């Protein structure tokens, strides 16, 4: 619990400085997406963004449905050769979310809050997305391939919790 409070306080502090209306100064922090996503989400994965998916599969829950606090992992694409990661800040519909991320497009090295991301995949599985692009005040024209979402929590935590709850119910019924 203390880790989450510390991370939230740090994120709030970072957010205060990252969204300053003053021009960037030489001493301002330059945020990489992975450093920011790790601190903001609490998901402790290291390395280039595109490697997060492979690393997460054995350690964290992964899937193709957004959840607040999960990390959307972008595949390498075009000039984005190391991929990208973004933290889901809000789920608006089954095909529209908002993310908070760093070092994207027109905001190199800066943090952007609540950026709209739209699932444009034909099957609704978030494998292809478009991202809001501030310089044109609209969704960008590029379609980005993604791996999916990494959820904050151990890979088997949900299943283990369900099994423990079922055992407790069975024990209670046996005792009565």
Image (spheres, rainbow, N blue to C red):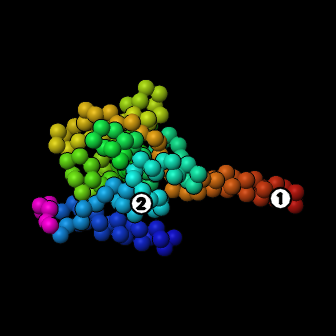
Within 10 Å of the Cα at label 1, are there few (<14), some (14-19), or many (20+) other Cα atoms? few
Within 10 Å of the Cα at label 2, are there few (<14), some (14-19), or many (20+) other Cα atoms? some
Q: Which residues are magenta?
A: 21-26
Q: Nearer the viewer, residue 86 or 74?
A: 74
SS assignment for the magenta stretch, majority:
loop
Judged left or right of residue 98, residue 56 is right
Report the residue at 45% width, 50% height from top: 51
Query: Looking at the picture, does residue 50 appear above or below residue 15?
Result: above
Query: Looking at the picture, does residue 71 appear above or below residue 31?
Result: above
Check disc 1 and report its element: helix, strand or loop: helix
Disc marking residue 171: 1
Residue 133 in the image, given as x and y percentages of width and height: 23, 42
Report the residue at 21% width, 52% height from top: 107
Residue 53 in the image, given as x and y percentages of width and height: 48, 47
Q: Which residue in the structure is indicated by mark 2?
A: 38
Mark found first going from the N terminus, 2 or 1: 2
Q: Nearer the viewer, residue 78 or 71?
A: 78
Check disc 2 and report its element: helix, strand or loop: helix
Res. 164 in view:
yes
């Amino acid at each position: 619990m203390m880790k989450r409070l510390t991370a939230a306080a740090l994120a709030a502090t970072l957010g205060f400085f990252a969204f300053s209306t003053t021009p960037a100064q030489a001493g301002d922090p330059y945020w990489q997406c992975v450093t920011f996503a790790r601190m903001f989400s609490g998901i402790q994965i290291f390395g280039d963004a595109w490697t997060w998916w492979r690393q997460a599969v054995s350690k964290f829950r992964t899937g193709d449905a957004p959840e607040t606090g999960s990390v959307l992992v972008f595949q390498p694409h075009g000039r984005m050769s190391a991929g990208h990661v973004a933290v889901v800040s809000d789920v608006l519909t089954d095909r529209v979310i908002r993310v908070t991320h760093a070092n994207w497009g027109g905001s190199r090295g800066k943090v952007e809050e609540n950026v709209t991301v739209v699932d444009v995949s034909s099957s609704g599985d978030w494998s292809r997305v478009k991202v809001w692009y501030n310089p044109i005040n609209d969704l960008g024209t590029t379609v980005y391939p993604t791996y999916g979402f990494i959820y904050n929590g151990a890979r088997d935590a949900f299943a283990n919790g369900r099994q423990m709850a079922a055992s407790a119910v069975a024990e209670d019924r046996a005792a009565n």
